[in-house]
């Protein structure tokens, strides 16, 4: 029982790490110029939050420059279709769609 739980944890961790690498979510931290302590040039951004269904519903929002990307919730059941059988086609589809707008995709996987 313990082994199965750890396999799932390792798999989810690997999936998230892969997603981070693929999506370029790892932002480089840029140190502020010591001569300029002003934060007036920071532009706020927004992230959409939604369930894993048709992202085309938010096409208009994804075209806005203030939208940085979308966080999508995927159920574990939809990813593991059978024991040790995984289907990432919805994530791949969403990644292509969001990438077409040069936006980021954050994955949230729930059991």
Image (tube, rainbow, N blue to C red):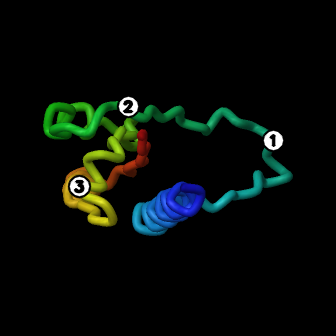
Relative vertical location of residue 55 with respect to residue 3 in this rendering, above or below: above
Q: Tell me the SS state at disc 3.
A: strand
Find residue 27 and report its image quarter.
bottom right
Going by the image, does 50 lie left or right of 3? left
Alpha carbon separation for disc pair 2 and 1: 32 Å
| Labels 2, 1: front one | 2
Residue behind mark 1: 37
Please tell me which residue lies in front, 110 or 67.
Answer: 110
Q: Looking at the rendering, which quadrant does residue 55 occupy?
A: top left
Q: Which residue is mark 2?
A: 49
Q: Position of residue 102 (x, y in %)?
A: 31, 55
On screen, residue 84 above or below 56: below
Mark 2 or mark 1: which comes first in sequence? 1
Task: Give 69 or 111, whichever is nearer the viewer.
Answer: 111
Residue at the limit of the structure toward the right, as seen here: 34
Q: Secondary structure at mark 1?
A: loop
Judge whether residue 26 can be spotted in this image: no
Mark 3 neighbour density, 10 Å: few (under 14) some (14–19) many (20 or more): few
Q: Name the residue rendered at 29%, 53% in the picture.
A: 79
Badge 2 local density, few (<14 within 10 Å), some, or many (20+)?
A: few
Q: Residue at x 36, y 38 (%)?
A: 73
Which dot, 3 or 2, sits closer to the camera? 3
Mark 3 to mark 1 CA distance (whole Å): 52 Å
Q: Name the residue tied to disc 3.
A: 81
42 left or right of 21 in image: right
Which numbered marker is on residue 75? none
Residue 22 horizontal side relative to residue 7, left or right: left
């Amino acid at each position: 029982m313990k082994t199965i739980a750890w396999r799932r944890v390792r798999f989810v961790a690997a999936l998230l790490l892969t997603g981070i690498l693929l999506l370029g979510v790892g932002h480089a931290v840029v140190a502020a110029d010591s001569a300029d302590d002003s934060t007036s040039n920071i532009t706020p951004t927004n992230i959409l939050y939604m369930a894993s269904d048709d992202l085309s519903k938010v096409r208009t929002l994804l075209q806005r420059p203030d939208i940085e990307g979308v966080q999508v919730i995927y159920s574990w059941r939809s990813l593991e279709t059978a024991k040790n059988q995984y289907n990432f086609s919805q994530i791949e589809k969403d990644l292509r769609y969001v990438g077409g707008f040069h936006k980021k995709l954050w994955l949230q996987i729930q059991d």
